[in-house]
Amino acid sequence: MGEIRPVYLEDKLKEVEDSGRLDYRSKALPTWCPGCGYFSIVEAVATALCELGIPNENAVMVSGIGCSSRFPFFINTYGIHTLHGRALPSALGVKTANPALTVVAVGGDGDGFAIGGGHVPHAARRNLDITYLLFDNGIYGLTKGQTSPTSAIGFKTPTSPYANPDRPLNPLLMLLSYGASWVGQSYAGDPEHLRSMVRQALEHRGFSYLHILSPCVTFDKTHRTYVNLGMQVHPLPATHDPADKLAAMGEAMKNEQAPAVGLYYREQRPTLDDALDALVEKAGGEKRGLRGGRGRKLR
Amino acid sequence: MSDARHHVIIGSGVAGNQAAETLRARDPDSRITMVTVSRLPFFNRYDLPRVFRGERDWRRFVIYPAEYYRRNRIALRRATKVVAVDSINQTLTLQHKETIHFDTLLVASGARSYLPEELSEYRPLLLGFGAFHEAVQVAETLPKRGHVIMLGGDTIGLDLARTLIELRHRVTLLADDYTFWPHEVSEADRPRYIAALRNMGFEVIEAKERGSLAAVSQGAPGLPARRLVFKDGSELHGDVVMPFFGNVPILDFMIGSGVDIERGLLVRPDLRTTHENIYAAGDNCQIWTDSVRRYCFYHGWKNVRAMGELAARNITGANEAWTPQHDESLRLTADGKILSPFWEYQ
Amino acid sequence: MNTDVQIAIVGSAGDGTIAAGDILRRAMAEIGYRVISFDLYPAEIRGFGKCIARLRVSDEQAYSLKQKSDILVSLDDSHAIPHVGEAREWGAVIYETNSVNPLPEGAHLSAHIDPGQVPYNVPIRELAEKSTGAARSRNIVVVGYIIGLMRLPLEPALRALTGKFKGKGEIAQKNEAALRAGYEEGLRWFRLDDIEFGPPPAQERGAHLEMINGNAAIVRGALDAGIDTFFGYPITPATSIMERLASEMPKRGARLVQTEDEIAAISATLGAGFAGARAATATSGPGLSLMAEMLGFGVIAEVPSVVFVSQRGGPSTGMPTKHEQSDLNMAVFGGHGDAPRIVIAPTNVEGCYRCAGRAFEMAEAYQTPVIVLLDLYLSNRYETVPFPDRPPFEADTNRYADTRGGAAGFQRYVLTADGVSPRSTPGQPGGMHVATGLEHNELGRPNDQPDMHLAQSRKRHEKLKAALRHPGFEPAKRFGDTGAVDVGLVAWGSSFGECLEAMYLAQEEGIRCAALKVLMISPFPVEMATSFLADCKEVLVPEVNYQGQFAGILQMQVPRAVTRMTRIPCAPMRVEEILDEIRRLAGRVVEPQAA
């Protein structure tokens, strides 16, 4: 979006090195297919962590299983690559054990809304202070192209050879009704917007849900392609008020035609950590630092 | 419930147990239930003086082991009080409101010790001897070489006194009409029998000589625990005071049953009461005795046992009349002691 | 004189049967006796089902209840009548003498008392009404009556009573009045039974005796070991672990979250374990099934975590309120792949405390999930436990890596002599790594080469062997005769108690007999079991499941013929049955039992 300018390689390299965000990239190279939208997510997270000055050792990437869930291997922080669908409850454990950590859960549409769908409402309603990056490509990539809960009606895949008859879920609408305190959408094909949204999500105190539309360049040649998405994706109306939940829900409903990116909803309310600290106070206990590395107290 | 006849026996003493044994032998398929207020199974109450020789385990007084009742299928219901008998419906009601139907009922509830009205206010200061725990209580209260004051006497008391004297306790007997109960001793014979008691080691005071008993109270500190005051103003001190005024039949529950009662249940020579399926045996019944044209009590264990057996025989089809099995008169021995036929139990 | 008295109180829900048992066992513990106690509840949540409270009071801590009770109390004859036979010969049967309603023949308890038992017909209701104005306190009257009848001191019972109903004003006064009324009545009664309470044993130094049940002991162990987080989902019979922790953990600044399901519970537990917390969850068989996959993750990613499992009748939903030991295979083998883990199974309440604490030590020391396997019987059974004044657990058994200046990438899964790799946790600079469920190399990067799979598999298995020598923990222990024996029992979990009781009885009959208590089932104490079995002419393995799961594991580890004694009575195994098996194996003639 905006004016197109030439980029010179030397300038770009210098800028990257100076930024320090390479420190947040691991030595492992992503195993994704060339052209996958997920590359830009790695870049966005590394950049956001760097910009926010979060020490590598104080961040934890938590994932389940799927193409997107390989994500922790490509970021130079602590990571826990768990089971299919279990990123959110695992993140709950990490964050509860050590609230000083910046915890980011990442996962795909199948991981989050099929097998792991039962966990999403609870992380949201408790306002668990983590960021959940949902990489939505509308397909199961790791198992080679089956339908997912966000696949479009009519999508033909090896498990729906006569075309998928099922309505796709509307994750934004779900998260809004679940009580997520920060709900936004971005598009992997717009790295600038993505970086900005990831950063905002990380900065939010509470459960931030960022839905990232991304094409599967290998297994989806018909629906969620760069070409199609590029035509459909548009920004939320400038008049949208992120404090207005009903309006956010209205915008989320429109996603079923064409997705709008931007911040749908944001509120400030006590997090799970706040609630647990309040419990300790109520019980007359003493708030204590929990175990970190080498038994050190982090708080 | 099976179709078998249900024989219910009230009481688990000599008569009741003998009846149960006979009933089981003569009516093997019947149900037999024995109901008793006692918490102990049938024990030898004649043997109770052994408590004073140090035997405190009640199990050693029990006549039949538990196995006997199991083997003979006698349902032994202890600690169970009968409150009413309905002779029309042939049921009896227990204190805990359970109703039991009977085909035949044998009332062998025996008798309890009698306490004259004028002494009832002193009951807390007196110690009884009817039940096992009372015997234990006396034995535990009485100090070594302690002094027992017996009011009345009766053959149960005299029997106990024989043991106490043997154990070097001092026994003072406040003699009156009950002293030889249930034996009848004429005024003319009485001095000889009293002398025999003295000969046996009793200290005997004829109550009448002191104008009878006026009060019983706690002994003053340093003195024995009990103090007796007589109407003539004299006093007597002892460690334990025990009343022995004979026994009265236990028949409260039969009142209103429709069965005739005088002092005891009135039974025909076949031990049947005025209800054809209700019998009685033991010292709670009076048997019509043609020879003397009146209803007679029998107290001795031999007679009581024979009554239990006869009742059971007649319940199960025999039609036999009662004849006393044993002479119940009191005797004087050659060496000047008295001997009651009630004192020896086998 | 030795004290060994068992009391059973039978009533229906609403009679306060369990409460009476609870006050009585607390009173006994207050006096200084050792107590073991197990209550039987109706399966229904409400209603008027049968309740039985049983407690055995002794000088030394007993491992199981006795077959026969010395004192049997009826608070409801319709429920108590089938249990009258439980009172032993010359034992006491205490019951209500004044019924409210007319009864048909045989409906009163007194109709069923054996001539060998001693009746105590007590006007319980009348005593309650006279002392409190209502019949509700019948249960308290009975407690007082027993204390009085047995000529025990009243003060400890009063303390136990106030401990149970603290700060309830008028109710507390009424309860005390009821207790005293029962006590006075008991004192009045002449004793015909031959039950004897000797003086209580001397107290251990450096410890204080407490009456506690298995689940509460687990909680105590977890707290004393410094538990940081607990995530759980309610399930019978483990729920009370979470409930108790929910009130206790915040007092210590620790955190508990009730998750949306058991999968979330174990996931969060491992997340917390990964973050360095002492983390635990608790569940029963169905929950353990749900957790199986994530436990495999804990194994391969080497994440310290503790799972308390209280077994109940299975499979599937099975019998949630019935006792069984049928989740052993699930605990040891559950989940896919070669997934070794530590499984320990306490055999009594004190063991619950010790196993809970040691489980956290082991989880950290060997970097693995540790399953502490209980069962319904053990969870709910009360015992007096001498708690040490100072918790005996190590606060931190981690082996941490020195990650300062490690630029080359931290080798989280480096191969070491004992298989344990020094770890780092989030917050520790230079220790960044990914814990993954994929097979991985020493850096924790995905790697599916045969050599690496072999090396990492071996490491995961070998490192657990050290757990068999874990400080302060005996994986197995021998009881009974030393040297060669005719019959040796090998037992685990709560059934060990019944086995030990049976073994003692067999010894009294002159049978040479020994018993091996196996506390650690994975890894299996092969050496101890082998030497024990070598001493046994016959081996008996009693357990409460159909398949003989423990016998299977035993035979897998130490191949030899054993007699499997499997019973699924929905309750603890009967001592008498085990004794009969011992007799049979010892060549004694055994009378066939009446059905």
Image (cartoon, coloured by chain):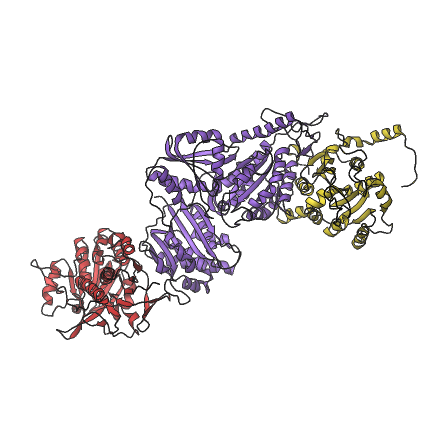
Chain colours: A yellow, B red, C purple
The quadrant in which the C terminus of chain A is found is: top right
Q: Is residue B153 left or right of residue A215?
A: left
Quadrant housing residue B188: bottom left
Residue A178 position in % (x across, y down): 72, 51
Name the residue: 66% across, 46% down: A276
Q: Above or below — where is C333 with respect to B299?
A: above
Quadrant housing residue B231: bottom left
Nearer to us in this view, C79 or B330: C79
The quadrant in which the N terminus of chain A is found is: top right
Name the residue: 63% across, 33% down: C300
Quadrant housing residue C128: bottom left
Q: Is residue C470 visible?
A: no
Residue A133 position in % (x across, y down): 75, 42
Nearer to us in this view, B199 or C561: C561
Residue C544 position in % (x across, y down): 47, 43
Nearer to us in this view, A17 or C235: C235
Q: Above or below — where is B37 with respect to C329?
A: below
Q: Is residue B10 left or right of residue C316?
A: left
Q: Is residue B274 left or right of residue C501?
A: left
Q: Is residue C420 visible?
A: yes
Residue C195 position in % (x across, y down): 34, 50
